Structure formats: structure tokens, C-alpha cells
Image (spheres, coloured by chain):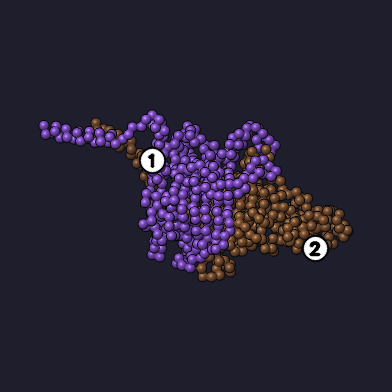
Chain colours: A purple, B brown
Amino acid sequence: MTKNFRYAILSTFLLSMVIQVNAELIGLDDQELGAVDGEGIGFILEDFAFEAGTDVATGNRLDISGIKNKNGQDVVLSVSQFYVAGAGSNRGANVIGNPVNLGRLLYPYNLELVDGDTIGIADKAVFEYSAPHRNTGSLSGSDSMLVVATEARSGAKGQRIDRVTGIDISVLNSRAAERADFGIRYDLEVAGSRAQSLEGHAQGVAIDGSYIRLWGENNEMVGNLALKVFASDLTFYACDSAGNNCGQDVRFQNFVLENELGWGEKQPVTFEVDSSGNFTIEVGRLNSACADLNSSGGCALGGAGYSDFYNNGPRADIHIGNVAVGGANFGSATIANMQIQYLRATSHDLGAP
Amino acid sequence: MIKIIFTLVLIVSMPAVALAAMQPMTDEELGVQTGQAFIQIDRNTSDPNYDFSRFTFGLDVDVSMNADLVQLGRYDDPDEPANSSDIQISDFSLGYIDESGNVIPFQIKDPFIELAFDKSGSAQNLVGIRLGFGGAAGKLSGNIEYLNGNLEVRVEGSARPIRDANFLAWLTMRNSDILGADAVLVAGPGEANTGEPISSLARRRANWVGIDNDTTMECLSSGCSLGASLATILTPGGCSLLGITTCFPLKNFKTNDIGNQNALDPSSSNYAGGLYMSFQSQRVVWPESGVTAEVGAFMNIPDGGITLDFEQSFNGIERIRTKFLDPYYD
């Protein structure tokens, strides 16, 4: 009887929990249910601050050794004073107690399996790791942060980008409190002698719109990559080996990098490491798919696929609003609408004498 | 029953465990492993004015790319044309498409990033950064609208147009004699200081290349001793030599060969050194370049054997196809 009584209490308790849980949920109607497609994990880092390697003098650093110079002398590259913080970090002086939110509930970082049919990769499940997505900008009219002016080509067809006229912050979903400050210090040691240090600090960094997509193809892992970075300010300067006697700042203001590599399965990106330890990165060659070639190697027929590539395919844009050295300004720098038709980079040993 | 299932699971899992076990490498195996020397770091303190730190990456890169615009150093300068830039190249391309529709990539060897530090004071002033290449081979295309930099072009041609224009030349030279001179960036026709090298002026942004006012022609043929003497006094003035134009718009040089690429056997291409883009807040002579990089953004396009006669220089170099659907062709 006692045993049955215990079972009865336990059953009642469990049942009550279920009832309580059900009571807190609100049912979805068919329309709402139809709009749900999130088979993944979203995550955010709230109140996040990180600081490492602050006490360089006592060896609080990461040494990368095994590097040589052309004379065969040992070179050590030390990494230290790495931090991630919120706005106003003051070049790493204000990190702890000054956190940042990386992502938020509406716009988290995502790990998910995506239906490849929806992103131009037919009949594949695609693993995707993505940052908060981007909006269509009110000024740019696209998911690019760059507002551009175009001009007609002289002696040729079509329009091309002539210059960047502005930066459209409305593209970003990361708000000011969700844009991090980063910093890092490198020290260079040559043949046992510490030479100098170089510090880099980034303010207001957002990577909205970035993603890595991976899938399998012919027993090989292939992917597409988008790296989109905005920083309101990048500052570099050098100091002596003790971190003193620092020189003037070199500043990149309003830095924008929008780089896409690969175009679905039409132009996959592969990464291989061979048995000797060297690696190869390849962005697939756009082989001629013309139904008929003209005399100069272009498409007499069948160029629709190429038209799609040149108009809508992956591209890279780099823009710096202003380069400043000390108190002098050297204006903007832009590389616009760069499209890669083929890339293969293979590493090799440089070999000291 | 549970024991049987457990035993079966254990038997099935054992091979996997065995396969996953790591094995130590022997000294011989370890000795053949490479790939650790992908990066090389060099610090050069031999220059009296600057220290340099160079980070070289052991990479062989083949690339075919197109960009609407490469525009570096766009800011107002009272010595420069309005709305100009230190470097402005539209429809910039590396590599090309051959007549059979094949992508022929541009070849790059061992790219590097180099930093320059002013050593005049105690502070470590970072005054320059450049992206350079240990070697490059292939076709570089674009409309060069402004260039703070260096484009190595040599003008060589038959003496015939000179003979036709000058009686003394007619007497001392043969039509088959070859006259030549190196061209540099100059102030062009219609600009102040026409024919003067840009490097001697306050301005830096050029859109003309030519034989400058201080350069004399050379007679390169054997047996042209009298002609050679005469050639030394044949100095262009204001972008003209005996009525022959000696300055040419940079825009005319639409495709430039860098190095000597073998498209059929890329592994036997001859790479040219010296291709780089840099930015500096002071005039810097980068190591092994032999060129003074002016303040601002700067681009050095090395000698890839661009040798043109007078007529070719005037007409420039036609742009090669760089896209399958190319606005300059289709």
C-alpha cells in the first residue's frame, strides 16, 4: 500500500508538471506554423568581455616559433593583449566591466542545416554557420553597405561603379551595443633579440551577413564563404620592444569589407592539405559553357549563365572611408565589384639557406 | 540478453577504437614532413632612413579576376586635378580569356606585406605599408586614369619618321636604324610643364607616359655611329620630337604583360619582380625596388617587355578579353 501510495504521489507530481508546462504554451495556428523553418541552433553572447595576455613582460603571451628569416635565423612572433569588449574600450584599457552583446534573440548567430535547393545547391543538405543577417539598405538598395555612383563605360557596353558616395549603416541588424571592440598586439623577436611591437585596435565591429556553407560533393567537402566586416575605426601603430615610444597612429576610418567566395555548386570553394603539409585553396574555374564561341573566345550563344554570374554572382568590395597618418588625411580607398573567375593558391616552403 | 548485446557492441566498436588510436612517427617519417616554412619574416635595418619588416607567404597563386574600380587615395590636393585619385584604374583585370574560351590566370609567386618605420626619432613611426609580389607573370588590364607610380615603357622604332622630318638625320641615318628611349610618367600636352617628368613636379598623379624633356634618343643599331651622335642631340621638347608625338595617354595601354607568361605551360613562365602597391606618408625607396615611392598610394608596374614603336605608342595596346561576356567585345 505504501509503495502504491508513493507511485500515486509521483504520478500526480509528474502529471502536474506537464499541465503546468502546457499552461504556459500558446498554440500556433497553421499560418504561424507554416512560417517556422528554423531547424538549427541560434546563439548569442550577452554581456561578453574577453581579455588575455595583458602582462607581456612576464611572458603572458602566445609565442609562434619555428619561423625563419631569409638568413635562416629564428624569428618568434608573439601574440598578446587580445581583447573583446564593448564600445569605449579605449584601446584595451577598459575591457572588464565594459561588455558587448554579440547577437540578440531576434538576430542571433546560427548553426543549422539548410535546404540546399533554396540557396542554389540542388539536392543537398548544407551545413551553415552564419552571423546575423543583413537588411536591404535604405540608401544602398541592397544588402551592401556601400552607396555607389555609376558611370557609362566609354567605348564599351554597360555601367560600372565610378565611386563610393556613402556608407549605409541601415544594412546592419547589429545595433551599436552589439558591435564589438577588438585589439591585439604582436611582438617580433629576431635571433633572440626583441625588435618591436605592433598594435592593432578595431572599434565598432560587425560581421552581419557573413556565413560559411559546407556540403559534400564527390567524396569531397566543398563550400561557399562570405566574410562581411564593418569597423568604424581600425588603428595601427608601432612601439619599441617594451611597448613604449609608440609612433603615430595609422587609422582606417569606416572600413568595409564585403567578400563572397564561391557561387553555390557552380563555383565551389575547396580546401585540401596534401601529405607534405602544404595546402591548396581553390575557387572553381568558370569553364566555358557557351553553346558556341565567337572568334575572341566569348559566347556567341549560350551566355545566359555568365550573364547571371556577372550580374548576380559572388563579388568582393573593399572600402576605407579615410586613411589618416598622424594628422594627415589621405582620402578614401576602394576596390569595387571584384569578381573571381578562378583562384588557386598553393602553399610551399620558402626554405631558409 | 543484455550481456550478449553488450558483447556485440563491444566487438563492433573495437576496430573503430583501434583505427582511432594514434601512432607515434619515427624520426625518418618526421624528417620528411614539411609545410612549416610557409611564412618568412625579415627585418631589414640596413637603410639609413627606414627600418623594414617583411612578412612573406610561400604561395603560388593563379587568379583570374575583374573589378569595376581600383581607386586608392581619393582626396583633394591643390596641386592635382579636381576629383582625381592617386591611383584610379577602371575595369581592372588580372588574367584573360583566350580564343578557345579558356581562362588563362595571372600567376603570382610569394606575395608579401612590408612595413616601413621612420628611424629618424626615438618613436617607432609607421610610415608605409606595401603589398608586393616575389614574382608575377600574366596580363594586367585596365583603363589607367590616374597613376601615382611607375609604368615601365620603352619606345623603340625605325629612324624613318625622324629622317623624313630632319635633313641632318636623313644624311646620317638609315631607315633601318632603330632609335629608342625609356618613357616615364610625364605632364602631358595641354598640362603645365608639358613633357616634364612627374617626379620633378609638385604633382604626383599622372595620366600621360612619354619621353621626357631631358631624355635623348639612342641609336641602337650597329654601324650607326654618325646617327648615334646625332641621336644624342635629339631631345623631345613638350612631348614632341621633330613633329613626332612622344607622349601618350596612360589609358591607351589597356593590357600590359607582366613578366613572360607561357600560357601553354604555366610552370615555365618567367616571373617579373617588382609589382607592388603601397601607401606611404613619406617618400620611401622600398627594398630591392630601385624606385622612389611618392607620398600617398603608389603602384609600381614593372618592365614586362613593353616596347613599342612610335606608331604603336600612339595607338597604345588593345585590351584583351577578360570576361566570357565582355563589355569591350560582346
Q: Position of residue B151 (x, y in %)?
A: 68, 55
Quarter in which the C terminus of chain A is drawn: bottom right
* Residue corresponding to mark 2: B232
Q: Is residue A97 above or below residue A23?
A: below
Q: Residue at x 46, y 55 (%)?
A: A203
Q: Residue at x 54, y 37 (%)?
A: A266
The count of marks equals 2
Residue nearer the viewer, B207 or B166: B207
Residue nearer the viewer, A326 or B11: A326
Residue type at tag 1: Ile
**Residue B323 at least partly seen:** yes
10 Å crowding of disc 2: few (<14), some (14-19), many (20+): few
Q: Judge left or right: residue B13 versus residue A185.
A: left
* Residue corresponding to mark 1: A41
Q: Which chain is mark 2 on?
A: B
Quarter in which the N terminus of chain A is drawn: top left
